[in-house]
Image (tube, rainbow, N blue to C red):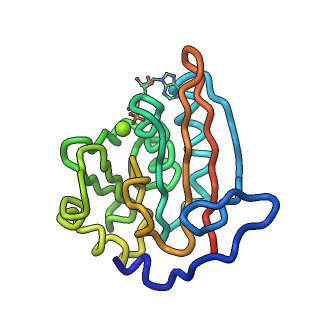
Amino acid sequence: MPWAADRQPSMGCGESGREVMGLKAVTLVERVTHSPEETVLFGREVAAYFRPPCLVLLEGDLGAGKTTITKGIVAGLGAAREEDVTSPTFTLVHEYGPNGQVFHVDLYRIEGARDLATLGLDDLSSQPATVLVEWGEKLGDNVPQTCFKVRMEHQESDNRRIVIERLEA
Ligand SMILES: Nc1ncnc2c1ncn2[C@@H]1O[C@H](COP(=O)(O)OP(=O)(O)O)[C@@H](O)[C@H]1O
Ligand SMILES: [Mg+2]
């Protein structure tokens, strides 16, 4: 995958970041939200980090809120209204914006490299778009040298802890 082409093994990481797949993870912002509406608003707030071209890996269990925050991010990027953003669980890839400037991918049902190859992520990676990937951890190290992670954790009741990280060499 072209995303991975220029990646060199990292020599370690600074004091501030953990290391993920040989890349340094720098925390940009953390928030606990208490409702889906608050998560959508937070997505709008952080959308500016994700201006194209970029890859955003969304991680967290089923129901953590990955699709919910994506509504805010897509709306914040001006590509669609939040109510028009729906889960690509079955369709695998949704495209938003007049020029396809945002792609929303769900890898939940994807198993193995062969399945991944059929998705056409190679083509997406060469476009000037923001690509949001639920279950992004399934991409393994097929990611560019700089990308983002949105980590979501279901806490008690409607609380979700959300951490936004930038991964860099
Ligand atoms: N603070 C919150 N943030 C996001 N979703 C929440 C929150 N509290 C409750 N929910 C509910 O949790 C579910 C999240 O679903 P969804 O965004 O589809 O998760 P995922 O895509 O991670 O599987 C929705 O039913 C939503 O209404
Ligand atoms: Mg989802």
Residue 93, picture quadrant: bottom left
Q: Nearer the viewer, residue 36 or 97?
A: 36
Q: Position of residue 46 (x, y in %)?
A: 62, 50
Q: Quadrant of residue 88?
A: top left
Residue furthest out toward the right = 15
Q: Position of residue 33 (x, y in %)?
A: 63, 28
Q: Nearer the viewer, residue 117 or 91?
A: 117
Q: Return the x and y of residue 161 as percentages of the image width and height.
A: 62, 33
Q: Is residue 25 left or right of residue 72?
A: right
Taking 91 as reference, is 98 above or below it? below
Q: Check the picture and name the quadrant holding the N terminus.
A: bottom left
Is 6 placed left or right of 79 in the picture?
right
Left/right placement of residue 95 relative to residue 50 reads left
Figure quadrant of residue 11: bottom right
Which residue does the image show at 48% across and 45% down from the upper left?
59
Residue 165: % across, % down = 63, 55
| On screen, residue 167 above or below 71 | below
Locate the C terminus by quadrant. bottom right
- Exactly how many numbered labels are in the figure? 0
Q: Residue at x 58, y 36 (%)?
A: 41
The picture quadrant for ligand 2 comes to top left
Most distant residue in the bottom direction: 6
